[in-house]
Image (spheres, rainbow, N blue to C red):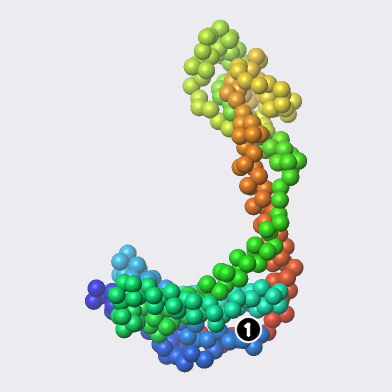
Amino acid sequence: MKKFLVISLLVLFSAGIFATSEINPDKTTPVATVNGEPITMYEFLAEVMPNYMEIAKKVEEVDPLFSEVLTSTEAGKTLLTEYEKRVLAKMIERKLFLQLAKQLDVAIDMQALKEKIHNIIIQNLKENNISIEIADLYYTLKGYTGGLEMYEVRVLNETAYRQTYDAIYQALTSDATVTEEEIVQYYKANKKIVLKIKGFDSFAPAYTFLNNAKASDDPVSLFDVEDREYTYENLIKETGISTDTAVFLFDEFKKGLYPKVISTETKHYVVYLSGEKSLEELRDEISKKLLEEKKKNIWNTFIEQYFVPFREQAIIEVGEIGG
C-alpha cells in the first residue's frame, strides 16, 4: 500500500498539468474556452486525476520498471501530456455538443441537474452512514483532489452530456421504421443456407462418395464435415462453384443430397443441404438490424450536417497543459 501511494504521487506530480497549475486550482481558472465558455482546470483535473491514480495502481502492479519509466523520464512525461491533450479534446467536443443542443432547444437545466446529483449522493452517504469528511477523504484518495465536490463536478458533466446525447438521439430516431419490403429484400440478399460440403481433388472419388450416399439410408452420417452457414456470395467465394449452381441451391433446391458432383477448376464437391433459416425465423433479427442501421445513418447525417459545421465555426482557445 505504501509503495502504491508513493507511485501515485509520482504520477500526479510528473503529469504535464502541474507544470502550469496547482493540484487543486481555482474553480474559475480556464484550461480552454469554447465559444467564450470556459472549461476550467478544476473540471479538467476531475477528468484526468482519478484516471492517473488508477493507471498508477495498475502499472505498478504489472511492472514497477514501466511505472518508473512513465513517471521519471521525458518520454513518460510526453506520453502523459499527450493523454491530457486528448482528454481535453474530448471535453471540448462535449462542450460543443451541449452548446449546439442549446441552439436546437434541447438543453439540460444544469442547475436542476446539479442539485439532483448532489441530493442523490448525500442521500446515499446518509443511508450508508458515511460522513462528508470520510467521503471527501475517499474521493481525494481516488484522485479527486477537490474531494467529494470535484467528484460531483465530473458526474454532473458526464450526466449532462449523456442526457443531452440521448435526448437528441431519441428525437431524431424515434420515428424510424422498417417496412416489410425492406425486411424481405434484406432476407433475399443475405439469405443463409446450411450445407455439408465434402471436397475432393479428383472427380472419381467424389462420384463414388455421392453414389454411396445415395444408396445409404442415412447419407448425412457419411459426411465427416460439420454443418456450415453460407451466404450466396460466401458460397461462391469459398468453393468457386458457378453462379447458376449457387442460385439453384439457394432458390430451388430445398433439402437433402444434391444429385450431382459439383465440379470447379480445382475441386469436386458433394453437397448436402441441411436446411435454411426461414424469413419468419429471422424476421425480428433482420428488423432490429435494419432499424439500428437506419438510426445510425440518421445520427451520422445529423453529425455531418449540424455538428461538424458548428465545430468548424467555433472559436476555441486552448491553454498550455503540458510541461
The quarter of the displayed image where residue 97 is located: bottom right
At a point 53% along the width and 9% down the height, the residue shown is 216
Residue 312: image location, x then y, percent = 71, 77
Residue 233: image location, x then y, percent = 68, 36
Q: Is residue 241 left or right of residue 5?
A: right
**Is 178 rendered above or below residue 142?**
above
At a point 66% along the width and 21% down the height, the residue shown is 254
Q: Is residue 268 left or right of residue 225?
A: right
Q: Is residue 283 left or right of residue 10?
A: right
Residue with the mark numbered 1: 34
Q: Is residue 86 left or right of residue 132?
A: right
Residue 236: image location, x then y, percent = 67, 32
**Is 208 rendered above or below residue 308?**
above
At a point 69% along the width and 27% down the height, the residue shown is 250
Question: What amino acid does circle 1 point to?
Answer: Val
**Is 307 rendered above or below residue 15?**
above
Q: Secondary structure at mark 1?
A: strand
Which residue lies most toward the left here?
A: 2
The residue lying toward the viewer, choosing from 91 and 128, is: 128
* Whether residue 206 can be seen here: yes
* Whether residue 143 can be seen here: no
Which residue lies most toward the top here?
A: 215
